[in-house]
Amino acid sequence: MTDLATLTAAELAAAYAARAASPSEAVAAVLRRAEVARETLNAFVLIDHEGATEQARAATERWRRGEPLSPVDGVPATVKDILLQRGHPTRRGSAAVPAGESWPEDAPSVARLREAGAVLVGKTTTPEYGWKGVTDSPLHGATGNPYDPARTSGGSSGGSAAAVALGAGPFSLGTDGGGSVRIPAAFCGIFALKPTYGRVPLYPASAFGTLAHVGPMTRDAADAALLLDVISRSDSRDWSQLAPPSSPFTAALVGGAARVRGLRIAYSPRLREVRVDREVADAVDRAVDRLAGLGAEVTLVDPPLPSFDEMREAFHVLWFSGAARVTEFFDERQVAALDPGLAEVRAQGARYSALDYLAAVDVRMAMGRAMGAFHEAYDLLVTPTLPITAFATGVEVPPGSGQRRWTEWTPFTYPFNLTQQPAASLPCGRDAAGLPIGLQLVAPRHGDATVLRVAHALYEAGVAGVPEPPLPPAAPPVTRGGS
């Protein structure tokens, strides 16, 4: 008998409509997986058994009456602990945030899920304030990878990626300021989309400014389109949101692989200078060959981006300034309790001047113009998501790499936060150790539907996707920090 926790959101909705399964049954299965993900991978900071069971019971009754609130009514979902969720603490991975407050408000994306009847199962782990590309914090400890718990899940939405991969809900809401949905998606073998900035309303505004996007993390591209249709609805609390999309993102998937024919695709395997692991490069090459086989016009070409030294410095000015801002009013005790890496970048961010910040803005504007011109010739850019597969937990950079900051091993992700373009990661193979490999699709601003359409075609063609990780046996939990 099919384990309901292994189904996609679309498959669950079809099962509900056919009365082959109920939300109560699906949520019960997902809650069991969530406990496994918490105890073996440390993917959750909170699992709401009582609330999820009650929400599922109400959704089951609506489906029984033939009156679901939406196509995702009764679908289990999780929320990264950066986004507000009414009735539960949002501690952002930080001991500096007290748990004992009223927490009366949902973030816009959470509110849209609740209105659509999705069942909110729990909150997933994040590094402190989502500041880095791996998921560990002094408050909650490290989150492991479902394919090897001794390796990182990536970050900063690492708990969400691990939860989705292990069947603890087909939907998760993540945030991405420099790769934070795409990095863990690549490491954990799932799909994730960073939409065009403003496509998904965000409140409160991120301290990292317009680098930060909210995005769907799912089992495949079809589910991401389904989730994006829900969470891209308007919310007056975000003054920078885009106008509602003109048509559903799910409609962009109709036609499948045939709709890839004739697309002009730029393939940049190294963005000029990135050193990419051989197994990663080979897997991405094979996927791009398949795109060409589907009729896309593939050209080997690098986009006109500045040097990585220039891009990384601009990103650091913006990112580290945000870290300084979010911790600006911390007292000595709170600062002493910070993740040591966050304390370092916070101090560096506080030293930047307004002129430094505006110079970094100039770099990103120039990048945006250059990529806009590039996409007049190419509908889509393809790169690896990351040059490596998952490394050990508990460290910011791969051991022995000689690197210092997470931005050194994520050269394919953060540039497209600077330009605000939609970018997705999908799994396109595994290395010899069985660890997933990610491929990145990048479109011009507002080209979210193109990203989803091509990603869906790759899933339909059997190029995207990796075998599910085995359920971990009962084992002691991953080491956690204090609470």
Image (tube, rainbow, N blue to C red):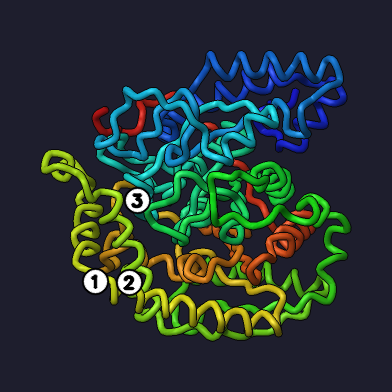
Circle 3 sits in a helix, a strand or a loop, which is it? loop
| Amino acid identity at mark 3 | Ala
Q: Give the residue at mark 2.
A: 357
Residue closer to the observer: 262 or 331: 331
Residue sitting at x 49%, y 49% = 175
Q: Which mark is residue 392?
A: 3
Circle 2 sits in a helix, a strand or a loop, which is it? helix
Circle 1 sits in a helix, a strand or a loop, which is it? loop
* Gap between marks 3 and 2 measured at Cα: 34 Å
Q: Give the residue at mark 1.
A: 353
Upstream in sequence: badge 1 or badge 3 = 1
Q: In this view of the protein, can residue 433 be seen by the observer?
A: no
Q: Which mark is residue 300?
A: none
Q: Position of residue 31 (x, y in %)?
A: 56, 22
Upstream in sequence: badge 3 or badge 2 = 2
Residue sitting at x 63%, y 57% = 242
Q: To which quarter of the image does residue 414 belong?
A: bottom left
Q: Position of residue 27 (x, y in %)?
A: 63, 22
Q: Report the label total.
A: 3
Q: Name the image quarter holding the C terminus.
A: top left
Q: Indicate whether 251 appears above or below 364.
A: above
